[in-house]
Structures are given as C-alpha cells and as structure tokens.
Image (cartoon, rainbow, N blue to C red):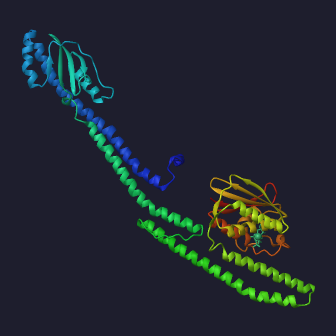
C-alpha cells in the first residue's frame, strides 16, 4: 500500500509527530470504548430492567382486568400501590401523550420494551416529570395511568463514566505533552548547536537527555573537536608556509629591482609578482572568516562598495537589479566583501563584463554575479568549487595567476552564513552565473 499521500497531512516537527502518536491511540480507545462498550452495555442493562418492570406491570394489569367492576379493581390496586411502589390512577383523567427527549437514547429502549411486553399500552411519557415515567394502558375499566421512578428502568448516571474518561484522557494527554517536551528539548539543543557550528560558531553545548540523545550529543562534540583541530592545523600550516615564504620573496624582489633592467629581469619580476599573488591567495584561504563577528549591515551597501572598487580598477562592472525590500542582515562584512571580490574578479577575468543583481526573498538573499565569459560546463561546476582546482589550464592562460581558491573561499563564506554558492549559466549574458545565497 502506498502511504505517500498521508505524509502531506502529517505534522512536520518531531514534537507534533510524537504528540500525534501519543494522542491518537488515547482518542481512538476512548471512542471505541464509549461507542461500542458503553452504548451496548447501557442499552442491555436498560432493556433488562425494563423487562422486570414489564413483569410487574403485567401482574398489575392482570389483577385489574380480573376484577369484575371498577370498585373491586380499585380495592385490588390499593395494596399494590405500596408494595410495587407505583402511583396508579384508575380511571385516568386523560389518555396521555407519548413524550421523549430528543437525545434520550435509553428512553427509546424503555418505550420499545414496554410496548413489546405489555398489551394495551396507549402512551409512555418520559419527559413531563424529571426522573419519573408515566404510562397509560387500556383496561376493562377504562384507561389506567401508572407512574414509577425512572431509576427502576435505567442505569444511574452513565454520563459519569464518559466525563471521567474524558477528564482522565485530557489530563493524561497534558502530562504526556509535558514529558514529551522535556524529552525533545535535548534534541533541539543538539540541532541548534550543530546548526551554529555549520555557520562557524562554537555554541555552548553539553549532552543531556535520554541515552540515545546523549550518545548523539557526545558524538557531535568529538566530531566538532576533530573538525576544529583540522581547521586549526590547516590554517597554521598554510599561514606558516605563506608567511615564511614572504621574506625570501621580498629579498628576491629587492635583488631584482637592483639589477640592470632587461627582458629577463622583467620576466623574473613578473614571476615574483605572481608568486606574491599566490601567497596572498593562500593567506586569504587560511584565514577564512575566523574571528570576524557578524554585524547588522545592509548587504546592498557591501555590494555597491565591491562594484565601485572593481569599476575604479577599470573593470566593466555594474549593479543590474535590486529586487525585493532591502533589509539589514547579520553578516561578516569583510568575509562577504571578499566573496564578492572573488566572484566579480572571476567574472571580469574570464569574461569582460560583469553584472551583479540582488534578490531579497522571504527566507534568503541571493546575490548573482553574471558575466559574458565562456561559463563553466555543468559537469565541471562541482570541481570548480573545490580548493586549488583550476579548470582547463589552456583556457586560463594569460588570465593572470589564479590559485584556484576564489570559488572555494566564496563557498566557505556562504556556508558560514548558513547559505550556499550555486553555479549556473547566465541567460542574459551567456557566461557564468554565480549565485551567492545567504540565509536571513
Ligand atoms: N566567471 C567564470 N567564467 C568561467 N570560468 C570560471 C569563472 N569563474 C571561475 N571559473 C573557472 O573555475 C576555476 C576556479 O575558480 P576560482 O575562482 O576558484 O580560481 P581561480 O580564479 O583560478 O583562482 P583565484 O580566484 O584563487 O585567483 C577557474 O580556474 C576557472 O577555470
Ligand atoms: Mg578566481
């Protein structure tokens, strides 16, 4: 059987699902018990009690009908009134009216049983007097009215059971929800600690709750520690190497500047400049956005700033559109600027023009950088995002000294802001379209 359609109606949160698992059986059990059990039992008891009443009334009717005249009949009735606890009026003043409450389910059973067991029942009145039943029957001496307590034919207060069940049901549900909330809190804390770590924060977290949740929490902590250690090592190694190489490089530069200018020296100078560029790239990558605190800033300002910088450097870059209502967001400005510089830098390096657009959505902000270059084939996009990967070296010739870090730095920065970097094809310009997605 396919239960996929059911998924649409299921609550999405664990809390909702667990509550449903707890509450649904309680409600179903209560419904089944009240409808099947109570209804049947109550009807059966009422029927049996009414049948007993039929025997007594039948006896009374026989006695009255056997009396030769009204006076004897009244004499016969006299002792029976007391012994059978009946209020008898003979002859009755009226013929009586059949009356029953709309929701009086047991009343239906009483009327049915009395009519089936007794001859000459004219009317059964269950309504005009509370807790009393009046019955009119035909006798030899005219119509006879008999009154008796309703409790003699139906069970006392069946509603109490229903109310009790309902109250205990609600109480147990409330208790279950409170317990459930306590059980789910550690899972929520683990989820928010992992989410924070994904965005680059180290949130205070200690495993709590049920054994399984504790185990998951402990596993998360050791994983976080290992990742932190690795990031630290990577940063130290890259920055160490880059830093140490700077000194000999500066010496080389100095040495070259003191030499007689000739084409070979110029080539060497270019090589040294390229190496300097590579080292700057390494350092940027190694630094990441560590240490920078998020601030509330307008992303459009950052974007305009990055575009202006590129224009000042003589590049053809412009803001194409700002869609949606601009809002301030919690961002790390230096990191975001670096990501934008990398994307715009790529666009004008591999193409000649770059257009930057911003779209504010309900849940995120998308900054798109489009260019008119060759773009990146679908199959290569994932590879391009990896550190130190440069695609098709021939294509990149004479495009300056790329390290292959720009896109992976931008991706890292997007992730630490809870977002992503998506590569696609620009419809308007034909080149690459890089979407920097940042969650709000
Ligand atoms: N706008 C673009 N158009 C076409 N190809 C691109 C574009 N941007 C990046 N690429 C390809 O993706 C590869 C990786 O880009 P990335 O920015 O990571 O490195 P890079 O530009 O080579 O070096 P770096 O940015 O570190 O100086 C590039 O080598 C290039 O082949
Ligand atoms: Mg680049």
Q: Relative to residue 72, is residue 124 depicted above or below? A: below
Q: Is residue 121 left or right of residue 68?
A: right
Q: Is residue 399 left or right of residue 244?
A: right
Q: Relative to residue 251, is residue 176 depicted above or below? A: above
Q: Is residue 264 left or right of residue 161?
A: right
Q: Quadrant of residue 313?
A: bottom right
Pick the quarter of the image with the C terminus. bottom right
Residue 406: x %, y % from top left:
73, 71
The residue lying at 46 percent from left, 52 percent from top is 17
Q: Nearer the viewer, residue 50 or 221?
A: 221
Tally the marks: 0
The residue lying at 50 percent from left, 49 percent from top is 10
Residue 66: x %, y % from top left:
10, 13
Can I make out residue 315 in this image?
yes
The residue lying at 35 percent from left, 47 percent from top is 170
Q: Relative to residue 230, is residue 245 depicted above or below? A: below
- Farthest right residue? 262
Residue 385: x %, y % from top left:
71, 68
Q: Nearer the viewer, residue 254 or 212?
A: 254
Ligand 2 placement by image quarter: bottom right
Can I make out residue 346 in this image?
no
Q: Quadrant of residue 176?
A: bottom left
Q: Quadrant of residue 308?
A: bottom right
Residue 34: x %, y % from top left:
32, 39
């Amino acid at each position: 059987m396919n239960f996929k359609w059911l998924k649409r109606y299921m609550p999405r949160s664990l809390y909702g699902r667990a509550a449903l698992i707890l509450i649904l059986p309680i409600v179903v059990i209560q419904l089944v018990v009240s409808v099947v059990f109570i209804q049947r039992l109550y009807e059966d008891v009422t029927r049996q009690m009414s049948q007993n009443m039929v025997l007594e009334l039948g006896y009374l009717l026989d006695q009255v009908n056997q009396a030769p005249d009204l006076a004897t009949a009244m004499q016969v009735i006299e002792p029976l009134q007391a012994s059978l606890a009946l209020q008898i009026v003979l002859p009755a003043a009226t013929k009586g009216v059949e009356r029953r409450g709309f929701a009086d389910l047991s009343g239906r059973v009483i009327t049915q049983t009395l009519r089936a067991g007794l001859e000459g029942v004219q009317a059964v009145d269950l309504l005009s007097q509370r807790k009393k039943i009046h019955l009119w029957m035909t006798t030899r001496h005219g119509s006879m009215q008999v009154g008796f307590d309703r409790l003699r034919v139906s069970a006392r207060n069946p509603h109490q059971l229903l109310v009790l069940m309902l109250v205990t049901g609600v109480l147990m549900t409330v208790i279950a929800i409170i317990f459930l909330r306590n059980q789910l809190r550690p899972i929520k804390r683990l989820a928010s600690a992992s989410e924070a770590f994904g965005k680059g924060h180290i949130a205070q977290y200690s495993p709590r709750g049920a054994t399984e949740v504790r185990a998951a929490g402990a596993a998360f902590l050791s994983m976080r520690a290992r990742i932190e250690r690795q990031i630290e090592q990577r940063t130290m190694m890259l920055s160490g190497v880059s830093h140490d190489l700077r000194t000999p490089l500066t010496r080389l530069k100095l040495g070259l500047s003191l030499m007689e200018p000739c084409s070979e020296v110029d080539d060497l100078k270019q090589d040294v400049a390229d190496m300097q560029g590579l080292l700057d790239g390494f350092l940027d990558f190694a630094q990441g956005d560590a240490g920078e605190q998020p601030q509330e800033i307008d992303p459009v300002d950052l974007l305009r700033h990055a575009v202006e910088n590129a224009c000042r450097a003589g590049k053809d870059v412009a803001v194409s559109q700002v869609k949606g209502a601009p809002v301030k967001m919690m961002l790390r400005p230096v990191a975001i600027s670096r990501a934008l510089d990398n994307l715009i830098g790529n666009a004008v390096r591999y193409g000649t023009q770059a257009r930057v657009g911003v779209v504010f959505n309900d849940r995120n902000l998308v900054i798109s950088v489009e260019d008119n270059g060759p773009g990146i084939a679908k199959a290569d996009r994932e590879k391009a995002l990896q550190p130190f990967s440069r695609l098709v070296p021939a294509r990149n010739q004479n495009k300056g000294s790329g390290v292959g870090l720009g896109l992976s730095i931008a991706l890292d920065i997007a992730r630490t802001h809870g977002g992503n970097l998506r590569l696609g094809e620009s419809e308007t310009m034909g080149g690459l379209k890089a979407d920097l997605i940042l969650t709000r």
